């Protein structure tokens, strides 16, 4: 078959996702894209748009039941929140439709595809689903396995955005499982994550010196989400310790599975269930990642990364906090 001239620019979001980026200035809407835009997303439940709907899992490992999806879609889509995800908001910012899950019947790859799957890991021992969702990265193995980024680079990836690991030890489900009181967090978990994030950042920077045309953005998801947890009112939330949907000490277990309680207004909560932010939380995070200062995303924020020029690949056909009311 004839060779085609394409630009594979992956935006890799570590929690974990990868997007193919357009060569267009998002500051100037009058300009037209130089090449076709598609987004390829890799990740776990933070970015899963419904792949787990098609995998033989227990009910508690899916999000295809009420009240997930209640706010925006008004029905459960398999997203682990009440509405849209970070990647949905990013897609909207670049004028693209939401990227469909890889396992959804009848999809094509014209606008990309979402490989993210809740709970996914890179090793079979971690999660047998890796046999189905093949391109998945795992948090705590990430900096030991930068070869995965090398493999994506060899396939044509040139732009990567990496979300470091968030403060899981302070999220409602973690605090509930440890029966932590007040503002206590699982400090052991937080220390492990901080060490991992430092090592991962160093590994990514080393790749830049080795790979021609490799461009990246490291987004400090840890610091941003931790600040949102500790100072919810600064971001327009009334509650960050309890989740909107679930049961238990912090209402953080088994959203949608009886007995559970559901808040009246999810936008007032940072977390929808024990682990995952509400749509309102994801919208704020997407805005921060898109326009953030170097303290939030460096050396580029996502808007700047999208706007960078990159070289076509010949392939065969075969923290300024935004104000929210």
Image (spheres, rainbow, N blue to C red):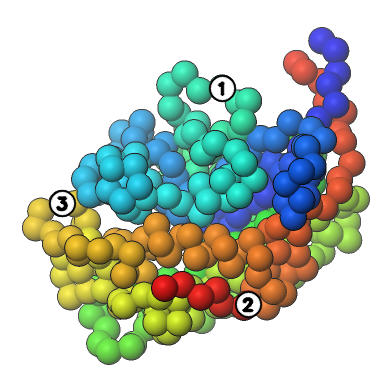
Residue on which disc 1 sits: 108
Alpha-carbon neighbours of circle 3 within 10 Å: few (<14), some, or many (≥20)? some
Closer to us: mark 1 or mark 3? Answer: 1
Instruction: Give the vertical position of 231 relative to 208 (above or below).
Output: below
Q: Marks 1 and 3, Cα distance to the nearest angstrom?
A: 34 Å
In this rendering, the count of numbered labels is 3
Foreground label between 2 and 3: 2
Which structural element holds mark 1?
A: loop
Q: Quarter-wise, where is residue 9 in the image?
A: top right
Say whether marks 1 and 2 touch (CB < 8 Å). Answer: no
Secondary structure at numbered mark 3: loop
Residue at left 31%, top 51%? Answer: 71
Q: Is residue 130 left or right of residue 3?
A: left
Tell me the crowding category of disc 1: few under 14, some 14 to 19, or many 20 or more residues within 10 angstroms, Cα based: few
Q: Give the number of the mark in front: 1 or 2.
A: 2
* Relative vertical location of residue 275 with respect to residue 242 in this rendering, above or below: above
Q: Does label 1 or label 3 sit earlier along the sequence?
A: 1
The percent coordinates of residue 109 (x first, y second) are 60, 26
Q: Give residue 23's position: percent from left, percent from top.
A: 79, 43
Label 2 to label 3: alpha-carbon separation: 37 Å
Q: Which residue is mark 2?
A: 319
Reply above or below: 198 against 111. Answer: below
């Amino acid at each position: 078959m004839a060779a085609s001239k394409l630009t594979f620019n992956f935006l890799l979001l570590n929690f974990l996702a990868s997007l193919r980026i357009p060569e267009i200035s998002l500051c100037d809407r009058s300009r037209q894209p130089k090449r076709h835009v598609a987004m390829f997303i890799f990740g776990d439940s933070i970015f899963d748009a419904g792949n787990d709907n098609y995998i033989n899992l227990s009910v508690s490992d899916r999000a295809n039941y009420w009240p997930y999806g209640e706010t925006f879609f008004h029905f459960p889509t398999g997203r682990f929140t009440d509405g849209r995800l970070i990647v949905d908001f990013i897609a909207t910012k670049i004028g693209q439709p939401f990227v469909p899950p890889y396992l959804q019947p009848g999809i094509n790859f014209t606008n990309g595809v979402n490989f993210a799957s809740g709970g996914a890991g890179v090793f079979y021992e971690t999660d047998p689903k890796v046999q189905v969702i093949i391109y998945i990265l795992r948090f705590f193995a990430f900096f030991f396995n930068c070869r995965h980024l090398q493999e994506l680079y060899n396939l044509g990836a040139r732009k990567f955005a990496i979300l470091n690991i968030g403060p899981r030890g302070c999220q409602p489900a973690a605090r509930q499982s440890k029966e932590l009181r007040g503002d206590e967090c699982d400090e052991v978990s937080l220390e492990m994550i901080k060490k991992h994030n430092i090592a991962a950042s160093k590994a990514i920077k080393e790749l830049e010196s080795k790979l021609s045309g490799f461009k990246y953005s490291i987004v400090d998801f840890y610091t941003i989400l931790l600040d949102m947890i500790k100072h919810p009112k600064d971001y327009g939330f009334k509650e960050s310790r309890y989740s909107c949907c679930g049961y238990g000490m912090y209402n953080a277990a088994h959203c949608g599975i009886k007995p559970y309680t559901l808040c009246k207004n999810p936008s007032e909560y940072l977390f929808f269930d024990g682990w995952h932010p509400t749509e309102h939380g994801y919208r704020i995070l997407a805005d921060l990642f898109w326009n953030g200062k170097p303290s939030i995303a460096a050396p580029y924020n996502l808007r700047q990364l999208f706007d960078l020029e990159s070289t076509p690949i010949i392939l065969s056909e075969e923290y300024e906090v935004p104000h929210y009311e």
